[in-house]
Amino acid sequence: MIAAEKIEIDSRYCKGCMLCGHVCEFDVFEVGQTRSALDYLMPRVANLSNCKLCRKCQTFCPEMTLSVVAKKKKEGGV
Amino acid sequence: MNPLAEKYLRKEFLPFLFCPGCGDGIIVHSFLKAVDELGIIDDLAMTSGIGCSAWIPVYMHADVLKVLHGRAIPAAIGLKASRPSRKVVVFSGDGDCMAIGGNHFIHAARRNIDMTVVVVNNQIYAMTGGQVAPSTGVGSRTQTTPYGNLEKPLDFCKLAIGAGATMVSRWSTAHPKELSRTFKKALNHKGFSFVEVVSQCPVQTGRYILGSGSPQFNLQWIKDNCLPAKNPAQWAELEAQGKIPVGDIMQVEKSEFMEEVARMNQQVKEAAAQGGEN
């Protein structure tokens, strides 16, 4: 099954441009309430279960600060 | 943090000095992806002039030469002449490469020197505060044209083809995968390869020309206006509609300048060894 384990956003470098939320077709992101080290409102991963691992957000992040971590396949699993 | 950033960026220089939502970071990602797939980070030698986009190579763990405004291509020619084994890449903006350094660009393309020139086109002089550039469209209001621009914009790709470049492409920041593929092709191409990247600048282009400073609006504008063209007829059709056609326009093989120089040196040496006066 295709699923993301987590979406990491580095709070040191995020500038809150929200391009990740704009390019995402599955409504994974929303504007969050926490601020990054540069004092911008960071995106929040609201619906991680919607993620289809297309990694558009990772490609379009202009600060290269977002990364999508895929779930590892279980050894010998189904 | 992005795995490519972890691997190839100078962490001590981060964060990028680009404004929130700037397209230059997307270009860094696409370029690093191409470099990672080819595995040539140690062979790279990059030069850049002055401007926002000239900061792109500075963040990468590779050899970088930062030179005078508009003089990135002459520095790259010298680099290529002294180290022919290196892959020379020039990162430049529309003002840096086409206004101040326009003549250098034309003559480097004419000689077909083996290098890759990446021009980031954001339709305005962004770093200095939004003045009119050679790529600004007719009627656009900028800081120096408050009643609208009267000058026709310069078509960089047609200029490159006319000057004799052997590989010409145009993509935008809304097409990062295609851009990465084209970077790979350009880095492998023997001869002068020119890649124009239409990029968003929410702070200057967005505010002055498009009417919104929102990064999402600006990226969507690029997505709506930069449309892929498969052949020259489609290209002309899109241009007539007022859109910006993108795609790989041409790629031809021609004799490369530095190889010709090396061959001539060899001939002169052989003639001198035989005692003749050439």
Image (cartoon, coloured by chain):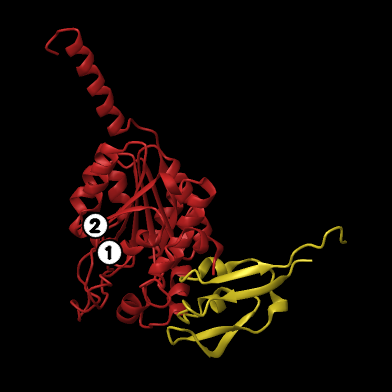
Chain colours: A yellow, B red
Q: Residue at x 47, y 56 (%)?
A: B32
Asked which quadrant contains residue A59, the reply is bottom right
- Structural distance between the alpha carbons of marks 2 and 1: 9 Å
Q: Is residue B62 above or below residue B201?
A: above
Q: Callout 2: residue from which chain?
A: B
Q: Residue at x 65, y 68 (%)?
A: A69
Helix, strand or loop at disc 1? loop
Give a yes or no on whether discs 2 and 1 share a subunit: yes
Mark 1 closeness class: few <14, some 14–19, many ≥20 residues within 10 Å:
many
- Confirm whether residue A57 shows in the render: no
Q: Is residue B180 above or below residue A19?
A: above
Q: Is residue B155 left or right of residue B37?
A: left
Q: Residue at x 27, y 64 (%)?
A: B135
Q: Is residue B276 left or right of residue B18?
A: left
Q: Position of residue B148 (x, y in %)?
A: 22, 77
Q: Position of residue B71 (x, y in %)?
A: 20, 53
Mark 2 closeness class: few <14, some 14–19, many ≥20 residues within 10 Å:
many
Asked which quadrant contains residue B206, the reply is bottom left
According to the image, label 1 marks what residue? B135
Q: Quadrant of the C terminus of chain B?
A: top left
Helix, strand or loop at disc 2? helix
Q: Which mark is residue B86?
A: none
Q: Quadrant of the N terminus of chain B?
A: bottom right
The residue furthest bottom is A33
Q: Callout 1: residue from which chain?
A: B
Q: Are marks 2 and 1 in contact (CB under 8 Å)?
A: yes
According to the image, label 2 marks what residue? B98
Mark closer to the chain start, 2 or 1: 2
Closest to the observer: B274 or B157?
B274
Instruction: Count the numbered circles shown.
Output: 2
Q: Position of residue B178 (x, y in %)?
A: 51, 55
